[in-house]
Image (spheres, grey):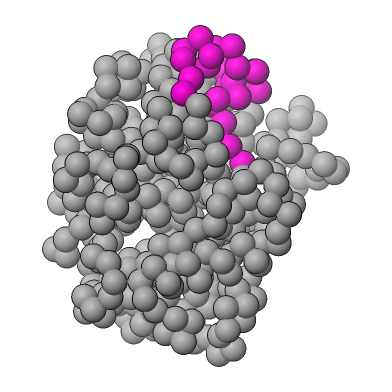
Amino acid sequence: MDLSGCAVVGIGRTAYTRRSGRTGLALAAEAVRAALDDCGLTAADVDGITCFSTGDSASPLRVAHAIGIDDIGWAVGIHAGGNAVATVIANAAAAVITGQAETVVVYRVLDASVRYGKVTAEVSVGGVEQFAGPHGYLVPPQWFAMWARRHQHVYGSTCEDLGAIAINGRNHAANNPHAIARDPISLDDYLAGRMVVEPFRVFDCAYEVDGAVALVLTTAERAADLRHPAVHPIGAADSTGAGGMPDLWDDQTAMYSRDAAPRLWARTGLSPADIDVACMYDCFTYTIMATFEDYGFCGKGEVGDYFREGRATYGGDVVVNPHGGLLSEGYLHGLNHHYEAVLQLRGQAGARQVPDAELALVTAGAGPYGGAIVYSSRRP
């Protein structure tokens, strides 16, 4: 589907903190109100709302009610994590284009009651996960550490290559007052970081926070009359393989992007060389490594050199995660990547603005399940 008939017109977020002491509902309502205020609309203008969660979020109906909507025509909650961000936004855009709703809010919220890197109670598993359960092999850091090891074995990538990715993101976060981790790190700092799951050190893992992010989407025609320049989603692509189960994927040196990338470039008529800003989903540094290769920015085993040579920052080929990404700005399951892309394409990113940014790639997900959207500052 051609998504250019839709536009992102409003963005909102809360502060990102470690322990806000607030409920997910309060955080979500704040972000949604901020996004509406950003574009000059009110709750009365909203007739659609959607979010994604793994059972850890305030529901769309609750959030709609909290901001003063008692009758919402289109409300969708999707049970998924960061893998589904692009899917959720593309669905919202499709709802606008097909007339199911005129103005849709997309949001994501996390609070301190949920920390994906912490287990506080008994863990039970079913299905195919029962084979790994007795070995304590249960959570994403373990899965993708294994994937990273496979990449190192096949292509000769190193921990120093992962470190180059972490350092690049932290350097960018230094110019982002909203980022929770802004202190630059050196390679020595990275290598001295606490080991989490080999080869992942603490700097390889996303920084979990409390917070919420929201986007407002409406028709391109209505967008022309609103407060800020419209940002248009011009193409999206997803891929889900192996039933979404990491251990059943056929090649751990590549991710879902191996299959989604050709679809995305074919649908948009673009290539990696056209992209000014790449907001790459970075739950782990290895996620960037594998997907960056799959989307075609460089060849297999070349990511470390690409980042060390300055090609992933200002003055290089493409600016990767100018806000610091999930590794340094904060882990909002990737919706904050879309916030940053819109801000960049509006030319409103301040000290971290990418000069003359017109096209942004935003990716979502890791392993066998994910997708991406390309945004443009111009309607095709």
Q: Nearer the viewer, residue 114 or 357?
A: 357
Q: Classify residue 220 as left or right of residue 174.
A: left
Quarter of the figure with the C terminus: bottom left
Q: Residue at x 61, y 62 (%)?
A: 27
Q: Residue at x 39, y 53 (%)?
A: 338
Q: Position of residue 369 (x, y in %)?
A: 48, 46
Tell me the quarter of the picture where residue 157 sits.
top left
Farthest bottom residue? 71
Q: Position of residue 46 (x, y in %)?
A: 45, 82
Above or below 223: residue 274? above
Q: Residue at x 50, y 75 (%)?
A: 49
Q: Nearer the viewer, residue 5 or 133?
A: 5
Q: Magenta stretch containing residue 34, yes or no?
A: no
Is residue 311 at all visible to an observer of this figure? yes
Above or below 172: residue 21? below
Q: Which residues are magenta?
A: 184-208
Is residue 327 at all visible to an observer of this figure? no
Q: Classify residue 297 as left or right of residue 78.
A: left
Q: Position of residue 211 (x, y in %)?
A: 59, 53
Quarter of the figure with the N terminus: bottom left
Q: Position of residue 15 (x, y in %)?
A: 55, 52
Q: Classify residue 261 as left or right of residue 174.
A: left
Q: Residue at x 45, y 62 (%)?
A: 12
Q: Classify residue 367 as left or right of residue 155.
A: right
Farthest right residue? 122
Q: How many marks?
A: 0
Tell me the quarter of the picture where residue 280 sits.
top left
Q: Nearer the viewer, residue 269 or 7?
A: 7
Above or below 38: residue 186? above
Q: Magenta stretch containing residue 194, yes or no?
A: yes
